[in-house]
């Protein structure tokens, strides 16, 4: 049985369709005081798969509610977009490691036989905080397949920082293109600066690959830089389209040609589905 959390209903539906499994009927609402309410109205089976991304704090509460509703069942938990994964380290004294705190809160609800899957989690180290087996799935080949259909001119793959270089290399391999990275320094939560590397982009189509677009600051700066350097067209490919506030406006004002993202979060730019990737993983543990 597939249980789709409130932030992953469409993805859960696609996965249930691929697997030919029942999609549970669930109800979600918020009480007048702001508290979340969840109910799995369908009769629970012995093995359940809960699918819930956690872009907002309330999504973590819904997830905990679903896990509690499924206590004593064998649970596979899929968190396609794991919010707070960027808080994977203690950067200053007195800070919590929030990603660890979330995993620690979920551990007792997952039971002895639980399994966890994430998709391109920002820091794989977060998985080590789960007590049950936890695995990260890679959506890069799916994004690369979509990019391949764009008929690009002499393409080059760029990572906006060293952190996304592994993803960019993987994408470049699938596209048969070269890749490089930009040197990024984060100035604040919304501002980043970038130093150009020795990349020859003149007259070429560039695809920037990253795990996520949040405020759009990183990508907008990269697009502006690459266009100044003479890139013909600049495309973005990202797994998680968080897209807070005016992110899309920033990207288009910077001159992006198109934004390609996966459906770990359900947005208008989510044209690449990770449903087959997740379905295959779920099938593998049955
Ligand atoms: C950072 O290391 C990530 O890979 C992304 O580049 C970053 O989180 C994107 O954030 P924003 O869109 O707010 O610049």
Image (cartoon, rainbow, N blue to C red):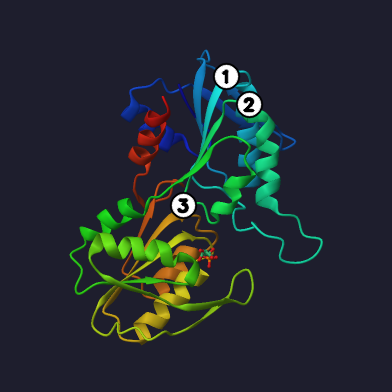
> Where's the C terminus, which quadrant?
top left
Q: Is residue 269 visible?
A: no
Q: Is residue 49 left or right of residue 169?
A: right
**Residue 118 appears at what percent x and percent y?**
50, 44
Q: How many C-alpha atoms fall within 10 Å of the one at disc 2: few (<14), some, or many (≥20)?
A: some
Disc 3: residue Cβ within 8 A of ligand 1's nearest atom: no
Q: Which residue is mark 2?
A: 111
Q: Nearer the viewer, residue 165 or 65?
A: 165
Q: Nearer the viewer, residue 44 or 171?
A: 171
Vertical comparison of 129 with 241: above or below: above
Q: Which residue is mark 3?
A: 120
**Residue 126 appears at what percent x and percent y?**
60, 50
Task: Work out how far the residue at label 1 is from the one at label 3, CA to CA, in angstroms.
Answer: 27 Å
Number of callouts: 3
Regarding mark 2 in the picture, which secondary structure is present there? loop
Look at 64% across and 56% down and name the residue there: 88
Asked whether the residues under the numbered discs 2 and 1 touch, taking CB atoms below 8 Å apart as contact, a structural biologist would say: yes
Q: How many C-alpha atoms fall within 10 Å of the one at disc 3: few (<14), some, or many (≥20)?
A: many
Vertical comparison of 162 with 20: above or below: below
Most extreme residue toward the right is 94
Q: Which mark is residue 73?
A: 1
Look at 43% across and 85% down and name the residue there: 196
**Residue 90 appears at what percent x and percent y?**
72, 61
């Amino acid at each position: 049985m597939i249980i789709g959390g409130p932030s992953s209903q469409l993805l859960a539906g696609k996965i249930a369709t691929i697997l030919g499994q029942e999609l549970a009927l669930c109800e979600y609402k918020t009480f007048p005081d702001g508290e979340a309410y969840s109910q799995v109205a369908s009769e629970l089976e012995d093995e359940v798969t809960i699918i819930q991304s956690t872009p907002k704090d309330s999504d973590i509460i819904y997830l905990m509610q679903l896990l509690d509703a499924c206590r004593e069942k064998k649970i596979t938990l899929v968190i396609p977009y794991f919010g707070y994964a960027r808080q994977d380290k203690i950067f200053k004294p007195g800070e919590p490691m929030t990603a660890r705190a979330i995993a620690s809160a979920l551990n007792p609800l997952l039971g002895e036989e639980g399994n966890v899957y994430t998709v391109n989690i920002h820091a794989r180290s977060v998985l080590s905080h789960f007590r049950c087996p936890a695995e990260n799935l890679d959506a890069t080949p799916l994004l690369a397949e979509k990019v391949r259909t764009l008929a690009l001119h002499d393409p080059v793959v760029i990572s906006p920082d060293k952190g996304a270089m592994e993803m960019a290399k993987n994408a470049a391999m699938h596209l048969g293109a070269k890749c490089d990275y930009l040197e990024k320094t984060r100035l604040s939560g919304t501002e980043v600066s970038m130093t150009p590397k020795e990349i020859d982009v003149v007259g070429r189509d560039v695809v920037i690959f990253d795990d996520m677009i949040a405020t759009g600051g990183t990508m907008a700066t990269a697009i502006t830089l690459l266009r100044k350097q003479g890139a013909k067209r600049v495309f973005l490919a990202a797994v998680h389209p968080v897209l807070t506030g005016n992110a899309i406006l920033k990207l288009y004002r910077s001159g992006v040609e198109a934004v390609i993202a996966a459906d770990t979060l359900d947005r208008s730019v989510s044209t690449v589905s990770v449903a087959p990737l997740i379905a295959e993983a779920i099938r593998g543990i049955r």
